[in-house]
Amino acid sequence: MTNQVQLPLLEVRGLKKWFPMSKGFFQQRTVFVKAVDGVDIDVQAGETLGIVGESGSGKTTLGRCISRLYEPTGGQITMRTDGETLDVSALKGRELSAFRKRAQMIFQDPYSSLNPRMTVLETVGEPLLVNNLAKGKDLEERVTQMIVQVGLRMEHLRRYPHSFSGGQRQRIGIARAMVVNPCLVVADEPVSALDVSIQAQILNLLKDLQEEYALTYLFISHAMNVVRYVSDRIAVMYAGKLVELGSKQELLSHPRHPYTEALLASVPKPSQRKRGMRLVSAGEPPDLINLPKGCVFASRCKYATDQCKEQPPELRQVGTTEYVSCHLTESLTLQGI
Ligand SMILES: Nc1ncnc2c1ncn2[C@@H]1O[C@H](COP(=O)(O)OP(=O)(O)O)[C@@H](O)[C@H]1O
Ligand code: SF4
Ligand SMILES: [Mg+2]
């Protein structure tokens, strides 16, 4: 038998999203916030790729470009599904609507992402209705089946969001995303607004649904301890760039980028949980309007050399499944967990 190489479900190349902003007293100058600036990633069918990085590193923008809630400024997004290869970055009109059904998002804030004037039946049924997938009795049956699967009950169907807890609201958001049978789900900080005691329940629900429907997840979080719980591979973002990508085991035990090392050092140990999160590393991320000419992490990196401040490192392959963008990776011995 020949060994078939499986092509990734999703291929992202050189993805950019620059937000224009007016500057100056008379707003006479347009500058660009480089929220995502040249990201390459592959996502394999059925895997969970975690995206981690501090607030402001471009995770949400990346997720929104991939699910085409944002139009990218540049780069390529390709998705292979149902025997078709889609040029996601170029989709328009009806094709774009059809794609949005296949790539669903789960949002951070279950309080603001649900319409307070819509019942659970209307909220979860809406994507079926607008995509002409079901109506009437058939729709109600599919919504009922879905909400039971996410751990809610039939009597919840006609209630409004205000009568639910944060965890239950997130279950409604998950049901709404899953009801149209997507192949890719972008979950953007899906447990960050929830009590720690509820977080594991929601993460386990996502894992169960993934198994049942063979889903592919892009799982976004600023919290390494959440990302490590759900991911097969982890991508680390800093200042709109991918700085490291690798299998979970390898990235956690042998980080190859100084920023990953700093993120891992900030994961609270069980004995420290009550004292809260430690700072990732001294200093501030660079100004995304005026990125430095060398390595984006140089101003906070304890290993930085003159070369780092002058030349930007490229993302390059350093192991079977490991990629890193750091000039010095081969000469550093970084601390994992
Ligand atoms: N619509 C927008 N207009 C201008 N700047 C934006 C917009 N959305 C995000 N940004 C900026 O882009 C950067 C990345 O933001 P975001 O993708 O939300 O990061 P993260 O999700 O990692 O916290 C931030 O500096 C943010 O202020
Ligand atoms: S390239 Fe230099 S500054 Fe950037 S992470 Fe590597 S060692 Fe640090
Ligand atoms: Mg975000």
Image (tube, rainbow, N blue to C red):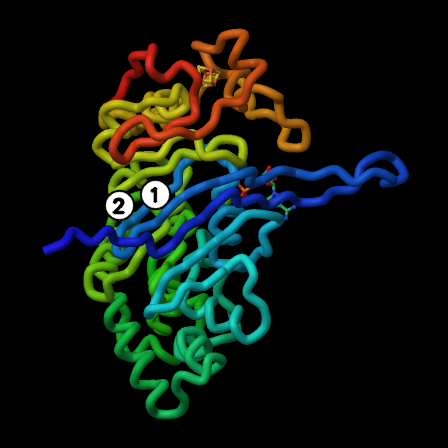
Q: Nearer the viewer, residue 311 or 135?
A: 311
Q: Nearer the viewer, residue 9 or 233?
A: 9
Mark 2 belongs to which amino acid? Val
Q: Image check: 272 left or right of 92?
A: left
Give the residue at the far left of this rendering.
1
Q: Image check: 185 left or right of 294?
A: left
Residue 249, above or below 298: below
Mark 1 belongs to which amino acid? Gly
Residue 132 visible from this viewpoint:
yes
Q: Secondary structure at mark 1?
A: strand
Quarter of the N terminus within the rendering = bottom left
Which x, y percent locates residue 120?
40, 74
Residue 309, above or below 288: above
Residue 296, above or below 42: above
Q: Which residue is mark 1?
A: 50
Residue 230, disc: 2
Q: Image check: 206 left or right of 70?
A: left
- Quote the CA–CA distance across marks 1 and 2: 8 Å
Residue drawn at 33 percent across, 69 percent down: 83
Residue drawn at 37 percent across, 25 percent down: 260
Give the residue at the far top of this rendering.
306
Cβ atoms under marks 1 and 2 closer than 8 Å: yes
Q: Secondary structure at mark 2?
A: helix
> Is tag 1's residue or tag 2's residue first in the polypeptide sequence?
1
Residue 227, above or below 204: above
The residue mark sitting in front, 1 or 2, is: 1
